[in-house]
Amino acid sequence: MAEQLTVGVLVTYFTEPSRLTATLRGISAHLFKLLVIDNTDDPAHAATLRRTCRDENVEYTWSGANVGIAAAQNVGVTAALGAGADYILFLDDDSELEGSKVDALRSELEAQHQKDVDTIGIGPRIVESRTGQDLAYTWRGNRIRQTNLADDVVPAAFLLGSGAFIFAWAFEKVGLFREDYFIDHVDKEWGLRAGSLGFRLVVTPHVLMLHELGDAPALSREGRKRLYRHDSNVRHYYLTRNALLTMRDVRLPPSKYPDQMRLLLDSVVRKVIGSERSTMTRKAVLAGLRDGVLNRRGPWSGA
């Protein structure tokens, strides 16, 4: 039997070289090839990361500008397919996944595929390293909810972009990531699209990955627990706009849309008239709503 090849795709954006070195050393030896796609728009910083990757024997591609997470990942997917990859592992520069766990993800994915041939991807149990939150998202009836994992592999509504381990051939069936989203909800849209086409994604509790999501955590509105959050107004724009675009782009059963709209409206209310409001946040969220309704895509001109 021919060797099964796993190619890693890691997107960077003004990543600290020392941090990237630690990530590369922890994972690259366990992959057939690791591709670093750099969205930095500073030639000097890009030159430093290029040297870092060369020293670690990792393939480096400079985008020349911030082309967005989806476009950078698509460069990696295309290169991985060209290299004959059987599996593609997606990573962020701050994801803490032990290299030895790559084989565990591969074995679990193959086992799940044997049980259900529509299974095309698996994610590890991702824990937000500062808050302890489980970052798994599953369907509960007509609702997508963040789920604490127990002992069993569970079907996922979508996989977070970091840690997702996917059959390479799945991209020929489902398609590439939507570059017109630029950033945010890129992984969610792809996962929901895959589900709408009859494919299955799962999350395993048997492989742990630590990850930092968003900015500094804050207490929940009830004040009982710390939750990750996004402080960037640019991110507020994309999160709002792309939530609307996802509902436009993905063909879900009609019963599944109301809760998605409720979550979006709850977020909008908090950021426009609630305690999280600020003038710039309000402007970014309202611009996202406007552009989502008008089907405007790509980089935000107001960013």
Image (cartoon, rainbow, N blue to C red):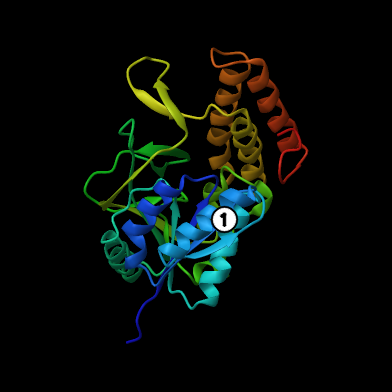
Residue at the bottom extreme, as displayed:
1
- Residue highlighted by disc 1: 47
Q: Quadrant of the N terminus?
A: bottom left
Q: Nearer the viewer, residue 174 or 214?
A: 214
Q: How many marks?
A: 1
Q: Quadrant of the C terminus?
A: top right
Q: Nearer the viewer, residue 141 or 104?
A: 104
Rendered residue at 63%/32% (across/down): 234
Whether residue 203 appears in this view of the structure is yes
Q: Secondary structure at mark 1?
A: helix
Q: Is residue 92 above or below residue 116?
A: above
Rendered residue at 57%/42% (across/down): 184
Q: Nearer the viewer, residue 127 or 189?
A: 127
Q: Is residue 101 above or below residue 80?
A: above
Give the image location of residue 151, x and y in percent: 21, 48
Residue at the left extreme, as displayed:
151
Rendered residue at 27%/63% (across/down): 104
- Dot 1, crowdedness within 10 Å: few (<14), some or many (≥20)? few
Callout 1 amino acid = Ala
Give the image location of residue 101, x and y in percent: 27, 59
Give the image location of residue 129, x and y in percent: 33, 37
Q: Nearer the viewer, residue 251 or 221?
A: 221
Q: Is residue 6 above or below residue 145?
A: below
Whether residue 251 appears in this view of the structure is no
Rendered residue at 60%/44% (across/down): 183
Give the image location of residue 247, x and y in percent: 62, 43
**65 horizontally vs 194: left or right:** right
